[in-house]
Image: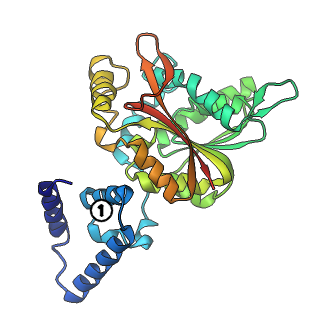
Amino acid sequence: MPLSVFRAALKKQYINNAHLTDFRVIDRKIAECRQMFAELGKGACCTYKFHRLLLNSGKKLFWVNSRSLQSKQNSVDSSDIKAFAKLSPDWIKENGPFKALYSMNRLRLPLIVDMIGRKTEQGHESLSGLHIADIGCGGGILTFPLARLGADVKAVDASVDVIASVEAENCFRHENCGLGNAVFKCSSVEVFAAENAGMFDAVVASEIIEHVADVELFVESCIQLVRKNGALFFTTINKTVASRVMAVWMAERVLGIVPPGIHNWSKFIEPKFLRMILEENGCSLRLSHGMIYNPLTNHWSWSRNTSINYALVAIKN
């Protein structure tokens, strides 16, 4: 971290805690900080954590060591919730603002089936009998195909408007197609995880991490949902110059692939940091692979290049 940035961050923390006047409280806070930094230790992941804790304007430095306070918080970003709520009517339009997500199913579904699917008597791949949590499900773009493959899917999203829209669509599909194994719930992942710990064979968090307020808390909650030896599937956007140009500037402002302002580059996460969070919480990396999108053909393909979009799969030990 550059010295100038470090100094600015420290100054901000002093200002945030300037209301403290009782020396006993100040001494206790200093002791908490010392303990926190002792626990962080050394290494790239710890440096990353330190950077997040120091610069995150939504948290005071002294908050970190108090897990009781964390239990009252969640990873929901209210600004993102409002943005997606406005797009609720568009979720079911396969050629609308979310057409790239519909197209991404050509990669996401085979990946999930290959990792956890079961062979039927006819030799077909199936997800029958498997319990899957689709976190940040949005309009059910991935939820419904998973359910059609036989999985019992619990789909969770923090937006009331989005869930109301997708539940109406689910009722329509249920009556006409017999698709009743997809259940939608409006909740934060933290609350849902507290109620359903260890209940799922797999958790899918596709194109959602880049929209949360606290990546580490979000990932920890996803891990909590999975039973031992269960799989966690993530797809998201890398934090690189290439992603800033292609996934934000080109995709939003030039090509109009996604609605303007839907992405915040500062919230993107590098694969190595996502991997570190998973490994710190008892998971092992199974796969990390890049994904390339062609906006002219609306087609996704696998790639060794992870500089923009990537998929990561981990197993809970």
**Residue at 46%, 40% in the rendered image:** 208
**Residue at 37%, 41% in the rendered image:** 80
> In the figure, residue 306 lies in which quadrant?
top left
In this rendering, does residue 169 appear at all? no
The outermost residue toward the bottom is 24
Amino acid at dot 1: Lys
> In the figure, residue 305 lies in which quadrant?
top left
Residue 205 spot, x, y in % from top left: 53, 41
Residue 106 spot, x, y in % from top left: 58, 22
Residue 8 spot, x, y in % from top left: 13, 58
In this rendering, does residue 254 appear at all? yes
The outermost residue toward the top is 296
Q: Which residue is mark 1?
A: 59
Residue 16 spot, x, y in % from top left: 19, 67
Q: Residues within 10 Å of mark 1 (few under 14, many from 20)?
A: some
Q: Element type at marker 1?
A: loop
Of residue 167 and residue 188, the one placed in the foreground of this image is 188
